[in-house]
Image (tube, coloured by chain):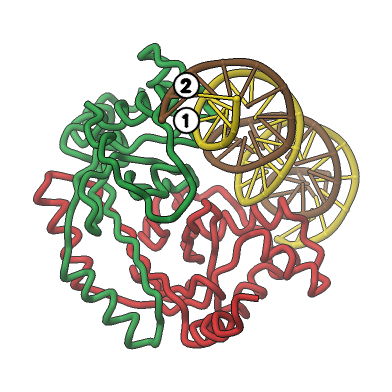
Chain colours: A green, B red, C brown, D yellow
Amino acid sequence: MVGTTASGEARAAGGREQRVTKQKVAVATALDELDDFVSTQELHRILQDRGASVSLATTYRIVQSMAEDGLLDVLRTDDGEARYRRCDAHGHHHHLVCRRCGKAIEIEAPAVEAWASRIAAQHGYTSVEHTVEIFGLCPDCSAAVAAEAADGGR
Amino acid sequence: MVGTTASGEARAAGGREQRVTKQKVAVATALDELDDFVSTQELHRILQDRGASVSLATTYRIVQSMAEDGLLDVLRTDDGEARYRRCDAHGHHHHLVCRRCGKAIEIEAPAVEAWASRIAAQHGYTSVEHTVEIFGLCPDCSAAVAAEAADGGR
DNA sequence: TTCACTGCAAATGCTTTGCAGCGCC
DNA sequence: GGCGCTGCAAAGCATTTGCAGTGAA
């Protein structure tokens, strides 16, 4: 379910009316049902498989605007690809992400936040932000990889 | 995953002879004298300004191989661009980076490392790595930005 | 001499954009 | 009806790669 779409959040900043189109609904719905980080390309493929016809360019545009509105968590893979995930919690948080299947668990770490600001302050840095992501293989993928290895990499 | 994960793998295989060329020396020297994170494109421009003629493709190739050998710290900007910096310390460490000028300070955080592995273990994740970077404005840039703002954003 | 390394340019692959038509409000 | 939204295809960009010439060992 899309839910939240109805939240008539009157954007104070004048102008910019946002229309509700089926493409946006399709994207939001798909993301809602996904639990993992997906690239825009993957998301687009998923939408096509569902029969929802949303062009790649539009998928990019929608995902981008959702990210700007803070509705999505964003992260970058090692090869520079951007991956998105539905973000219900709006507080600041981080992720424990499976580097094989993308499955992610949200984690909080007040201690780390505090540590980061302290370090930054110590060096006189301002407007501080930070990135903390943990990557690994989730239990399922760990097993899968182990099996593959045992298979002799044939 | 910011490099430094001392994965000295697959190199042992005796093959791979490495020749010392002036291009490699030029790149290594330039990086040595730089204290900030630079993109490959910037590095290439810097090399040209110095009169060292190293093609862009070669710059990419050299930087890439240095990163693989753990000689460079790597990080990705928000727009997916890769930035490199000379890495003398080989231990695992993180950075406090100025998002305006690229100036970086290496920081260590045993507590954070421990926290990361603990969290990962709790969820059954294996082959864990993590990224921790703090971005902000260094003292100099903070002042510069404040001045600009006072200037009326002109 | 040999073979890793270079330069150049074409090729990738993700992401953005110009433009004209379409449909939500 | 107006104007934000879409689709399509072309354009951008950072990065990679094929190939033949060049130079380090």
Decide which of D16, C2 is in the foreground and name it: D16
* Residue B20 position within the rendered picture, expressed as x and y whole percent measured from the top left: 69, 64
Q: Is residue B23 left or right of residue B144?
A: right
Residue at image coords 36%, 35%:
A38
Asked if residue B92 lies left or right of residue B34, the reply is left
Task: Give me the C-alpha separation between circle 1 and circle 2.
Answer: 6 Å
Q: Is residue A107 left or right of residue A13?
A: left
Expressed as whole percent of the image width and height from the top left, the position of residue A115 reads 23, 76
Q: Residue furthest top?
A: A51
- The total of numbered circles placed on residues is 2
Question: Disc number at residue A54?
Answer: 2
Q: Is residue B94 above or below residue A141?
A: below
- What chain does badge 2 belong to? A
At horizontal 39% and vertical 46% (from top left) the residue drawn is A67
Q: Amino acid at mark 2?
A: Val
Residue topped by disc 1: A59
- Mark positioned earlier in the residue sequence (1 or 2): 2
The numbered disc on residue A94 is none
Query: Residue drawn 59% across and 67% down?
Result: B38
* Callout 1–callout 2 Cβ contact below 8 Å: yes
Residue A49 figure quarter = top left
- Residue closest to the eye, A83 or C21: C21
Q: Amino acid at mark 1?
A: Thr
Number of other residues with Cα within 10 Å of mark 2, as a class: few under 14, some 14 to 19, many 20 or more: some
